[in-house]
Image (cartoon, rainbow, N blue to C red):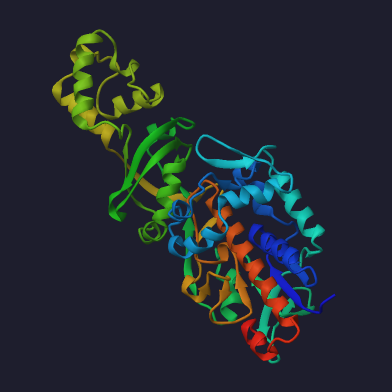
Amino acid sequence: MSSRRIVIVGGGPAGFFAAITCAEAAPNAEIILLEKGAHFLSKVKISGGGRCNVTHACFDARELAVRYPRGERALLGPFNRFQAGDTVAWFESRGVKLKTESDGRMFPASDSSQTVIDCLLGSARAANVKLFLTRGAERVAKRANGGFELALADGETISCDCLLLATGGCRAAAAGQLAVSLGHQLAPPVPSLFTFHIATPWLRELAGVSVEAVEASVPEARLRERGALLATHWGLSGPVILRLSAWGARELHELGYKFPLHINWLPHHNAEKIAASFQSRRGSQAAKLIINTPPAPLPSRLWAQLVLAAGISRDTRWAALSRAEQHQLVQQLIRTEFQVAGKSLNKDEFVTCGGVRLGEVDFKTMESRICPGLYFAGELLDIDGITGGFNFQAAWTTGWIAGRAMASCIQSLDEPGNDEDQNLRRCGN
């Protein structure tokens, strides 16, 4: 066996994908994966409500890249090499069939994240990756004679020829300290993918009510998104809110997560069309109570609250609706204003905007431009996608590219007749 060694720090999806890819491409190298926690792939376990949203059914590289508020330009090249279709093929070749839901999210057919975990663990072991739990890397240094030396939490030291950092999002500064110690800078971490706290009493009474298509906007941050909305016990969630939080991660952070939010409940209709439909109801449904006759597709509970919020009494019938009341109801439908007073991380996603600056990484190989021989993958980079499987796809893609590049680098060191000094410089040794 070759004496060449690669160490991967981080036992999440990016770390595992890189380890497997590298080990399969360079079977004579020693691949060591270190996880500081007590379990591998803990984020995979809980994602998608325990089902694991593996990727998204978006099979065009450019279309895929635009789903990333941070990382769109950097990921275009990598997605042309390994995108969602490649992820589907990778898992299916290992016995994990994926299914596509109506919104494009892709899950294992088993509806269990354990299927994905078992696949990754089995593939790593089959490729002879050495897996270690509760062995975090505390410090790392570049060796004078090439390669790296890591000090582990248990006091042990370990050396390697190539090093991959896949330690996840930098929710705390310490998460990126290994990269910083090797010369990198971090884009300041702020939360991405979070829900909005809203104290409006009538909204909280609607917990559990969902609307398939609304338009939500934050005028102060010039943000606007369309999608499904979910009322919760603490405010608002659902894909449209999570998209707003992703695209506006830094802007909403600067606002202290306190700002007016506007909701258009009927974004496919303008005010004139809505007003005309109300005029029609005054003739066709004159005797009916307004509060009992919601327009499609609004849920009846939501409609009732919107009618009351517009200042219309419960016993008002369509025949008695005044022009002023009609105007107020139309305005309520096209621009309900809520005051957002805070945020909560989405329970299925733990995504941070921020991390290693993208200009410091070569996305053809995922190798550091500052410290040769050092590679990155996953959320440690300043990359984050909207909800729907996109963050996992970035992990698979960057892990695959890093794994292939490290395997190529290690193999070049051992090729007979090559310029050893040139190869050592190429691989950072």
Q: Position of residue 210 (x, y in %)?
A: 45, 31
Image quadrant in which the C terminus is located: bottom right
Name above or below for residue 339 compared with residue 395.
Answer: above
At a point 58% along the width and 71% down the height, the residue shown is 365
Name above or below for residue 424 compared with residue 40.
Answer: below
In front of the other: 391 or 193: 391
Q: Residue furthest top?
A: 287
Q: Quadrant of residue 289?
A: top left
Q: Is residue 148 left or right of residue 376?
A: right
Q: Residue furthest front?
A: 417
Q: Quadrant of residue 48?
A: top right
Q: Position of residue 295 (x, y in %)?
A: 32, 21
In front of the other: 283 or 14: 14
Q: How many marks?
A: 0
Q: Position of residue 173 (x, y in %)?
A: 55, 70
Q: Is residue 136 left or right of residue 366?
A: right
Q: Is residue 311 left or right of residue 207?
A: left
Residue 196, visible in the rendered structure: no
Residue 146, visible in the rendered structure: yes
Q: Position of residue 39 (x, y in %)?
A: 74, 56
At a point 79% along the width and 74% down the height, the residue shown is 154
Q: Residue furthest left?
A: 323
Image quadrant in which the N terminus is located: bottom right
At a point 79% along the width and 68% down the height, the residue shown is 27
Q: Quadrant of residue 99?
A: top right
In front of the other: 115 or 404: 404
Q: Residue furthest right?
A: 1
